[in-house]
Image (spheres, helix red, strand yellow):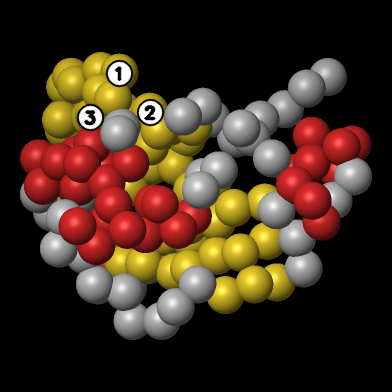
């Protein structure tokens, strides 16, 4: 049996603003935009992963049970440069941890993002296939 995380489901105080953020910053594509369970639901795709938004403000002002969303890239420096060119400001610089380099960023509604790259040269081919989604 194979299992895979399908999507993270987030509340959005302004769903259009959230969608625009993920489209502009990460090239997200809208998979559907429809009414479900009395609320607008929009599912977007970033690479092979998905985020589903409820068009409702978060139930609290913290992150609840969600710590962060991990977004993998094959060129972290270029992604950071792209976000900065759109006006995004990072608080800290890129960090390295073993075979990973990463930086944390805040998206709309206080969603914490971990932007990361697996450094191929620091892992075996088998390890890379296990931890990378690219």
Identify the residue under disc 3: 41
Dot 2 lies on which element? strand
For the residues marked 1 and 2, what is the alpha-carbon distance in whole angstroms? 7 Å
What residue is pinned by disc 2? 45
Is there any visible trace of residue 60 in the rendered image? no
Reading the chain from its start, which is encountered first: label 1 or label 2?
1
Asked if marks 1 and 3 touch (Cβ < 8 Å), the reply is no
Residue density around tag 2, few if under 14, some if 14–19, many if 20 or more, within 10 Å: some
Residue 13 disc label = none
Is 16 situated left or right of 88 in this image?
left
SS of the residue under disc 1: strand
- Of all residues, the one furthest to the bottom in this rendering is 91
In this rendering, is residue 3 above or below 55?
Answer: above
**Residue appearing at x 72%, y 27% in the figure:** 3
**Residue 91 locus on image (x, y percent):** 33, 81
Q: Residues within 10 Å of mark 3 (few under 14, many from 20)?
A: many
User: Which residue is tagged 1?
Assistant: 31
Q: Are marks 1 and 2 in contact (CB under 8 Å)?
A: yes
Query: How many marks can you see?
Result: 3
Residue 105 is situated, as x and y percent measured from the top left of the image, at 36, 67
């Amino acid at each position: 049996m194979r299992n895979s995380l399908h999507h993270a489901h987030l509340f959005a105080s302004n769903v259009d603003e959230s969608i625009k953020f993920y489209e502009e910053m990460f090239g997200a594509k809208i998979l559907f935009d429809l009414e479900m369970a009395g609320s607008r639901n929009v599912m977007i795709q970033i690479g092979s992963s998905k985020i589903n938004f409820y068009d409702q403000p978060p139930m609290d002002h913290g992150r609840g049970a969600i710590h962060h969303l991990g977004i993998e890239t094959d060129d972290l420096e270029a992604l950071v440069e792209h976000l900065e060119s759109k006006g995004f400001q990072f608080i800290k610089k890129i960090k390295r941890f073993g075979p990973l380099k990463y930086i944390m960023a805040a998206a709309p509604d206080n969603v914490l993002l971990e932007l990361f790259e697996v450094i191929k040269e620091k892992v075996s081919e088998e390890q890379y296939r296990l931890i990378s989604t690219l």
